[in-house]
Image (tube, rainbow, N blue to C red):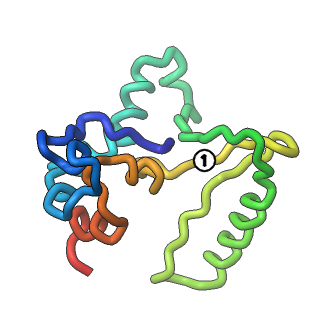
Amino acid sequence: EAGSAEGVADGAGGAAARGGRASREEVGRVGSLDQLYGEPWADKVERIRRASPHGRRSGWALVPLLSKANDDVRQEVFVMQLLRLLERAFPAPLWLRPYAILSTGPRSGLIEFSPNTQSLHALKKLPRFGSLEEHFLDHYGEK
């Protein structure tokens, strides 16, 4: 998963305690996006760079990756190639964020993920999650 929900606790009597979905008010109780997504990526990179014996070397980078097994990622490679083509064909305001994919075998690969993000699957596990629309409205404002 591309994130962590640590630090987001469900209050007594919340949706999780009732066995149901969270209300919009409960979704809004998450105080900040840092609480929702965990440590910001830039902070994590700096913390690991300081701890690494190689952190001062030029070219040192920390790349967030997902390891996929039992999945042919060659289709994803094709889609990212198509996105890069569309990114060049259509100038701003369209903004696409293609990511790196490396097929390491016929049924495995490495996929870069976007830092400071969380998968929809992980968001749905949160006790306060009602819908994706509610999540965006609560954290990023009205439409």
The residue positioned 55% from the left and 49% from the top of the image is 113
Measuring 25% from the left and 45% from the top, which residue is drawn there? 16
Residue pictured at 38% horizontal, 47% vertical:
125
Q: Quadrant of residue 78?
A: bottom right
- Picture mark count: 1
Q: Residue furthest top?
A: 53
Q: Residues within 10 Å of mark 1 (few under 14, many from 20)?
A: some
User: Where does the image place residue 60, in percent across and percent down from the top left?
Assistant: 55, 32
Determine whether 24 is above or below 52 in the image: below
Q: Position of residue 91 (x, y in %)?
A: 55, 83
Quadrant of the image for the C terminus?
A: bottom left
- Residue placed most toward the observer, 132 or 140: 132
Which secondary structure lies at badge 1? strand
Determine whether, in the image, residue 20 is placed left or right of residue 103.
Answer: left
Closer to us: 135 or 79:
135
Reply above or below: 95 against 71. below
Residue 124 x %, y % = 39, 53
Q: Residue furthest front?
A: 18
Q: Position of residue 12 (x, y in %)?
A: 12, 40
Label 1 sits on what residue type?
Answer: Glu
* Residue underneath mark 1: 112
Q: Is residue 12 left or right of residue 35?
A: left
Left or right? Give the position of 114 relative to 67: left
Q: Quadrant of residue 104?
A: top right
Question: Which residue lies at the image location 43% right of the left edge and 25% below the top edge?
Answer: 48
Is 134 placed above or below 53 here? below
**Residue projecting furthest to the right:** 106
